[in-house]
Image (cartoon, rainbow, N blue to C red):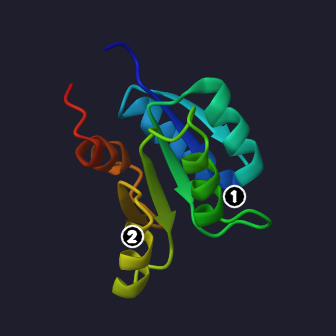
């Protein structure tokens, strides 16, 4: 299927860099990054990534609000979204899962297994 593209939307520079490095190095995927929900929505429409990793806690437009915008647009509606969150209580997990995201991954994530976790959730076979 060629190289997959993953969009990482997170307001923390170091998280974006680590995610990009491990998804490119371990997953062999192309990674596009966005530093805000607004930027992420624009990039998702422009790039049509194969998946989006979306931070929950961001200023202005948080993850769930960004996800709602992505869902409202026919161009980005079918892109699978995985939330990244430091909130890993079961109630939070259920709330996020109810939004219709593919999965919720805990932050901080393990850089060495991030690509594997994403591939597993999205059932991407090499």
The answer to which of 18 and 116 lies nearer the viewer is 116
Position of 55 compared to 91: left or right? Answer: right
Residue 89 position within the rendered picture, expressed as x and y whole percent measured from the top left: 39, 85
Position of 126 compared to 37: left or right? Answer: left
Callout 1 crowding tier (Cα within 10 Å): few <14, some 14–19, many ≥20: few
Task: Name which quarter of the figure residue 2 lies in.
Answer: top left
Mark 1 or 2, nearer chain start: 1
Report if residue 36 is visible in the image.
Answer: no
Q: Residue at x 50, y 69 (%)?
A: 85
Which label sits on residue 73? none
Position of 111 compared to 123: left or right? Answer: right
Q: Is residue 112 above or below residue 43?
A: below
Q: Residue at x 29, y 42 (%)?
A: 122
Q: Quadrant of the N terminus?
A: top left
Which label sits on residue 98? 2
Farthest residue in the right direction?
60
> How much space separates mark 1 and mark 2, taking CA atoms?
25 Å
* Element assignment for label 1: loop
Which label sits on residue 12? 1
Task: Name which quarter of the figure residue 26 lies in.
Answer: top left
Residue 49 position within the rendered picture, expressed as x and y whole percent measured from the top left: 51, 30
Residue 28 position within the rendered picture, expressed as x and y whole percent measured from the top left: 39, 25
- Nearer the observer: mark 1 or 2; the answer is 2
Q: Quadrant of the C terminus?
A: top left
């Amino acid at each position: 299927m060629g190289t997959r593209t993953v969009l990482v939307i997170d307001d923390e520079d170091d998280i974006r860099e680590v995610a990009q490095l491990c998804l490119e190095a371990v997953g062999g995927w192309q990674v596009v990054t966005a530093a805000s929900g607004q930027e992420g929505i624009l990039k998702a429409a422009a790039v049509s990534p194969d998946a989006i990793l979306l931070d929950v806690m961001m200023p202005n437009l948080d993850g769930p609000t960004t996800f709602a915008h992505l869902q409202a647009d026919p161009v980005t509606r079918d892109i699978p979204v995985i939330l990244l969150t430091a909130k890993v209580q079961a109630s939070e997990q259920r709330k996020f899962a109810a939004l219709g995201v593919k999965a919720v991954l805990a932050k901080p994530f393990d850089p060495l297994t991030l690509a594997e976790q994403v591939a597993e959730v999205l059932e991407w076979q090499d």
